[in-house]
Amino acid sequence: MTQTQKIDLLIEARWIAPVDSDALLEHHAVAIDNGRILALLPSNQARRRFQPARQRILDKHLLIPGLVNTHTHAAMTLLRGIADDLPLMEWLQKHIWPAEAAHMSPQFVLDGTRLACVEMLRGGITCFNDMYFFPDASAQAASELGMRATIGITTLEFPTPYASDADDYLDKGLAVRERWLEHPLINFSLAPHAPYTVNDASFERIATLAGQLALPIHCHIHETQQEIVDSLKLHGKRPLARLHDLGLTGPGLIAVHAVHLDDGDIRLLAESGSHVAHCPTSNLKLASGIAPLKRLLDAGINIGLGTDGAASNNRLDLPGEMRLASLLAKGSTGDAAAVSARHALRMATLGGAQALGLATRIGSITPGKQADLCAIDLSSSDCRPCFDPVAHLVHVAGREAVSDVWVDGKCCIEAKTLLANSPNNLEAALTLWQNRLEVCR
């Protein structure tokens, strides 16, 4: 008799979408040990081969890789709805930046990021790419909730309660990175805010640091048409061309939004191997425009999906972004096949992982990778009948159907219940922040 292998966890599912191919596996199982995916195989074989310490049977579920939020400002969840229905620069300059100047602190970032992590986990997001201030507090919140995070070393030229100038932002952020260097779930990026808030000398230092430390660069770019007009006046070139001339484009660049692109911009992104973080809801809500997603994909550019911050979305809802991205691409091109459900799922998982430089570790259900997983319950009458579970995920189910979530093999959400200890006094903190921020509306 063949001896069974002891493992930590065996998850059996009605369907599994591994994402590293277009395959949809039925009645398969994922074997997990020490936080890694050991095997992906038919359920009947898995039962004979493995002896799990824990077993989860999801007989009406679709199992997918954990979702990767390629761009957000997690702590801005505390600013959700504070200044709705305004264009980007008015929203930033007259409402968001003043609110941050008045209330920004490590505690603000800690509480806001805790709230964001709870929302993201409940919606199947296991990894997020953040850009905000007080990165030590952001890392602490993600660690408390058991999430994987890439924490941005945000850089601006003007002072905030966090730092005085670009060098101060970079020096403080690099020191935080050193403190978290050994944490298995926390990574870092260099995060210059945008070409209109960072000067050439700072960009050059960032490019040098990115090369020395092998860090991705996470930057808003070509979000509005006005940004391009202003750049042509000030620098005589488009923002992306300026970043290219300063050495920032390449496989390490995550170009956030990338809404207003001409053929030359798309060619530059493609030839340099840069990535795009597509944030369709935020782009629409701030009336920034509709990114040319189909043209980017046709050019071979890797795309990840992002929610942006809850202040400009107003949800950290990646299943919603999948649906909107697919529908916008279809409607804006007149091509019903422009972005399929499977392509939307790939952008929300492996595409984001690739942009963050984590594709060898997460983003697909592949033996050897970390076990970041998400289960979608398709048993509801709202999801019946179900002929294609991946299409149902994108166009029918939504984040409310997320039932179970694992990060690094550890269960964070089980049967829609958050397993991590609720951060101390979070509810009281949220009431306090609501009262303090009410005056900023």
Image: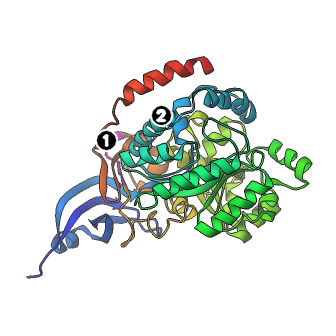
Q: Nearer the viewer, residue 171 or 314?
A: 171
Q: Nearer the viewer, residue 248 or 387?
A: 248
Q: Is 16 placed above or below 101 here? A: below
Q: Which residue sits at x=75%, y=34%?
A: 89
Asked whether 379 falls inside the magenta stretch, the response is yes
Asked whether 433 falls inside the magenta stretch, the response is no
Q: Which residue is mark 1?
A: 418
Residue 116 is situated, as x and y percent measured from the top left of the image, at 46, 39
Q: How is the image coloured?
A: rainbow
Q: Please, what secondary structure does the residue beneath circle 1 have?
A: strand
Q: Which quarter of the figure is the N terminus placed in?
A: bottom left
Left or right for 331, reference 125: right
Q: Which residue is mark 2?
A: 107
Kindly identify the amino acid type of the residue bearing the numbered disc 1: Leu
Q: Which residue sits at x=69%, y=67%?
A: 250
Pointer 1 and pointer 2: residues touching (CB < 8 Å)? no
**From which residue to which does the magenta span run?**
374-381
Residue 249 is situated, as x and y percent measured from the top left of the image, at 72, 64
Left or right for 253, reference 318: right
Q: Is 360 placed above or below 150 here? A: below
Residue 308 is situated, as x and y percent measured from the top left of the image, at 59, 43
Q: Which quarter of the figure is the C terminus placed in?
A: top right
Disc 1 packing (10 Å; few <14; some 14–19; many ≥20): some
